[in-house]
Image (spheres, rainbow, N blue to C red):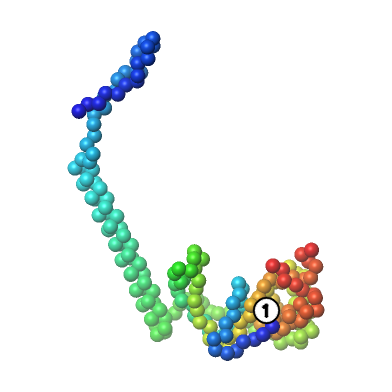
């Protein structure tokens, strides 16, 4: 059934060309073609979901297998040679001086930064920093 | 400043510095621990941990 649509005619206004009545053919709620397309789209989405799940399972199995081979020593991780830090043995007073000098150079530091930069034992750094805090020479920055 | 030695002793902090002979972290982050997921690992051999914060020379920030 054809539906007629048009602009309402007002009295005294002549009909303009663009006021022409538009005839619109009704569209079926869902054609067979549309139904086919939505079915295809649905199966495609399902397939993609299954493929993604399968991919995750494969990656997981590969990771697991690599871990097994690394543990057995069949393969190496390729991390390369480790750099060994040789710690310095210095007196507590010297350590204090060096820590204060480091704070002059780098404004904010934590225990790890100090131990790494001065190549000192972490426990010694903790002791020295604690003493400097008690002496009122350093404070928390955050 | 206390050092804990016993089983079940725990430490909590936003930043902890760690020193140990060996460590292993699980490859996958832990689900259900927010967007910035937690990670879990194991430290072994002469483990020493200390809670730390950034510090500065006194009077620098004023």
Farthest-out residue, bottom: B6
Residue A71 appears in the figure: yes
The residue drawn where x is 45% and y is 68% is B32
Q: Residue at x 53, y 79 (%)?
A: A81
Residue B4 shown left or right of residue A108 in the figure:
left
Above or below A113: residue A55: above
From this viewpoint, which residue is outermost toward the front?
A11
Q: Nearer the viewer, residue B10 or A36?
A: B10
Q: Position of residue B42 (x, y in %)?
A: 51, 82
Q: Is A83 left or right of A32, judged from the image as shown?
A: right
Q: Quadrant of the N terminus of chain A?
A: top left
Q: Is residue A29 left or right of residue A13?
A: left
Residue B41 x, y percent position in the rendering: 50, 79
Residue that carries the numbered disc 1 in the rendered image: A115
Indicate whether A95 appears above or below A1.
Answer: below
Q: Is residue A106 visible?
A: no
Residue at 22% across / 45% down in the picture? A35
Residues A112 and A27: in front is A27
Label 1 crowd bin: few (<14), some (14–19), many (20+), radius 10 Å:
some
Q: Is residue B62 left or right of residue B13?
A: right
Quadrant position of residue A59: bottom left
User: Residue A91: where, in percent of width, then height?
Assistant: 76, 87
Q: Dividing the picture into quarters, in which one does residue A31 lie?
A: top left
**Subunit that carries the residue with mark 1:** A
Residue A97 higher or lower than B59, as above or below? below
Determine the secondary structure under disc 1: helix
Quarter placement of the C terminus of chain A: bottom right
Residue A37: % across, % down: 24, 46
Count the labels in the image.
1
């Amino acid at each position: 059934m054809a539906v007629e649509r048009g602009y309402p005619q007002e009295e005294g206004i002549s009909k303009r060309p663009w006021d022409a009545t538009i005839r619109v053919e009704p569209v079926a709620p869902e054609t067979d073609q549309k139904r086919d397309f939505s079915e295809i789209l649905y199966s495609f989405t399902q397939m993609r979901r299954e493929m993604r799940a399968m991919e995750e399972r494969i990656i997981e199995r590969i990771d697991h297998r690599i871990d097994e081979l690394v543990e057995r020593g069949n393969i190496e991780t390729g991390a390369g040679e480790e750099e060994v830090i040789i710690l310095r043995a210095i007196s507590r007073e010297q350590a204090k001086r060096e820590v204060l000098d480091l704070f002059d150079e780098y404004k904010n530091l934590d225990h790890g930064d100090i131990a790494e930069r001065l190549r000192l034992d972490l426990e010694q750094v903790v002791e020295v920093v604690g003493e400097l805090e008690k002496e009122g020479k350093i404070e928390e920055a955050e | 400043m206390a050092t804990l030695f016993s089983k079940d002793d725990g430490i909590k902090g936003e930043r902890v510095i760690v020193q140990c002979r060996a460590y292993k972290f699980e490859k996958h982050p832990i689900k259900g621990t927010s967007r910035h997921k937690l990670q879990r690992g194991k430290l072994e051999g002469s483990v020493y941990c200390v809670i730390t914060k950034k510090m500065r020379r006194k009077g620098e920030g004023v």
